[in-house]
Amino acid sequence: MRKNHVITLAGIMAVSAVLAAPAFAEGVTINVTTTYAGEDSNAQNFKDSVAAWEEESGNKVEDSSATSDESFKSRIITDFEAGSEPDVLFFFNGVDSNQFVEQGKVVSIDEIREVYPEYASNMKDEMLGASPVDGVNYSVPVNGYWEGLFVNKDVLNAAGVEVPTIDTTWEDFLKDCEAIKEAGYTPIAASLQEIPHYWFEYAIYNFQSPQTHNTVPESVDDEYGQAWVNGLNDIKALYEAGYFPENTLTATDAETFQLFTTDKAAFLIDGSWKIGGITEAVDDIDHFAVVNVPGKGDRKTTDEIGGLSMGYYITRKAWEDEEKRDAAVSFVSFMTSDEVVSKFSGVSATALKDGASPDVSEFNALQLSALDYTASITGICPAVQDNLSAAAREPIFADMASIVKGDVDAADAVAAVLEANAE
Amino acid sequence: MGPSIYKNKKRIWVFLAPAFAFMVVYLYYPFIQNILNSFMHIKYMGTAGGEWNSPWYKNYLTLLSDPKMRIALKNTGITIAATIIGQVGIALVLSLLVSNIERGSGFFRTVFFFPIVVSATALGLLFNLVFLYDKGMVNQFLQFAGVLNREANQLIDWKSKYPMFTMLTPVIWQYVGFYFVILLTGLAGIPEDLYEAATIDGAGRWQRVRYISLPLLRGSISTCVILAVTGALKVFDLPWTMFVNGMSNTWLTGTYMYSKVYSDVDYASAIAVVIVVIGVILSAAVNRIFGKTEDFQ
């Protein structure tokens, strides 16, 4: 009898718990994936903004954000293929998004506006970042990016080298690298096996101009193809000169970044998102700055890489879920409001109609130097790699080690990229 | 009930059917589909093949001239040899030693088996730190021992200079315990009478191992070698964690297949078919070499 009572009581409690559960449930939980993670400058801003939206809306966010790299891109594509895509996605608006755009797995801004007319109305439509597939806007950007040359001033001082200015040429830069190397430091912190794309962009930019850089060559022999070959050969020359870390072909980006922040390497080309990572990693941010990447040929030192390459997508899966649709729209609207975008933008461009208004009084020395850097820019162009699919990028990015070691000819690598891109 | 359960075979089929259906749906159907995929053009991962390749065996022709596939096959061959000698060989020595001690065999069984319960990814990250260029354990030890010049901060880039050694060391280390337990169990199944009789006949310790343990362990060794060979063919997680994208030409068939999955799906399918074919051929060869599969009859 006693056993039966216990079982009956347990049964009643279990049923009560199940019945009572909906009474305590509040709002909706949406799955969100962004690149605001790791050393991204806005990783903390994102967490704060998510918390603010959750409090305001009563909804919840299941966040699976990760650092932006080739693995992240592959994961997103796989998630879409497997039907496990997030409800809201902050992702690239270039070729990387072609697959899920072609498959109709994200909702266009026009379609959203048919139900929510005010959606992204604070943005300039022409700057949203239309899809290469059909020229339609699917994503709402937050802040733009630029890529610049971060410098460790302590290493430069120790090597007797001045911080590069807008008058520094490529030849001056090479002399500086030699002086730094002779002083026993690593001139350039870069992992060519993991993150070769910043050097790829600027090396080929040196043989182009802001007007021509964002063009994928039609053949390896045309003007653009030759620029790519020459750029890759310049990276090979830097490698052969010993300006990259000794283990650049096996090190991770985290390892080479550590060389830069622990006063072992002088230069680092990276994006505006790295400001937060550097600030967190070093004791005295006053010893760091960001300057223009020294130019060569037609590219002036003040011609830089930058643009608005990412934005928030609402997936078809969330849009067709009546419970999640409102929450997804509300979340993106919140995260792309003037106030939040101003908080995120820092020293980068936005698509806001009224412009961003960041609080400069709270900027540190590196952010202030970034303001000077952006003010000096005379020409800007998006990264051309955003026009290539992951498969097309592979012969150069995954094989940079073979190119710089001379196992693969730069012209052959470019030809392989163009062949893969044509498929 | 009683013995009648064995007469009515229908009941057995009822219990076997779910497992059989599961295998058909989740193993044999995808495998056959994978073979078909290797002859088709597939644009994106997860999408159906649209049309047949031209010629239909195009991917297999490409495999023949693909330098990375050649590297992957060569490295996989080295890995197979290293796993047979390193994993099964070391496990055999350890199991023979442990079977000869009267106390503490349980302790060694646990200690040697322990790496198996750690995930390969975690081990990969661990050995990344062991072989780290700057401040890695091995380089620090070599500086401490005076092999490398500490004052000049002389370092070895293990992943660049000795890539296969760096990759295979943790792979071998991880699975020694697995084969050790299989062989130790095999040794435990050998009747003690045989050793006693041999001892009475004047056989020494080495002779007992040579003429009793090893011949009667043939089946267990054969199983271990087959598992080692097929395991080496598909090893992926630990090498990928340490040598992402086949850095320093460390491609294995498993890692090369994975690297192609997102960029060239049908080509990756062809590599998968090759892995299976090689696995089947090598398993049959091992079976043939070892002959009998029973420990003793």
Image (spheres, coloured by chain):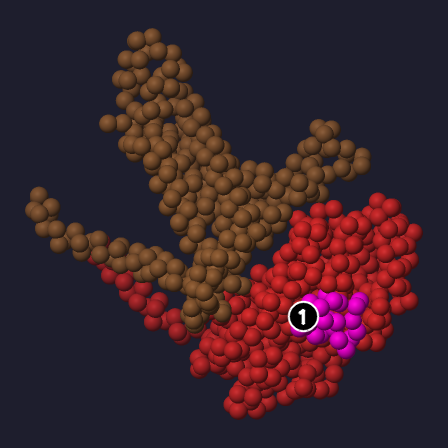
Chain colours: A red, B brown
Image vertical order of residue A116 relative to residue B130, above or below:
below
**Lateral position of residue A63 relative to residue B53, left or right:** right
Task: Return the x and y of residue A347 as percentages of the image width and height.
Answer: 77, 72
Task: Return the x and y of residue A159 as percentages of the image width and height.
Answer: 89, 50
Q: Is residue A217 magenta?
A: yes
Image vertical order of residue A51 relative to residue A11, above or below:
below
**Any part of residue A180 in sight:** yes
Q: Quadrant of residue A408?
A: bottom right
Q: Residue visible at 54% across and 81% down? A: A329
Examine the residues drawn in magenta and state their main secondary structure: loop
Mark 1 crowd level (few <14, some 14–19, many ≥20, 10 Å Cα): some
Q: Is residue A80 magenta?
A: no
Q: Residue visible at 59% across and 71% down? A: A422
Task: Return the x and y of residue B99 as percentages of the image width and height.
Answer: 39, 23
Which quarter of the rendering shows the C terminus of chain B? top left
Specify the subunit that label 1 lies on.
Answer: A
Residue under numbered circle 1: A219
**Residue type highlighted by circle 1:** Ser
Observer-nearest residue: A33 or B258?
B258
The residue positioned farthest toward the front in the image shown: B55
Q: Residue visible at 40% across and 75% down? A: A23
Q: Quadrant of residue A15?
A: bottom left
**Any part of residue A39 in sight:** no
Observer-nearest residue: A1 or A191?
A191
Image vertical order of residue A299 relative to residue B275, above or below:
below
Q: Secondary structure at mark 1?
A: loop
Give the magenta-colored segment's residue range: A206-228
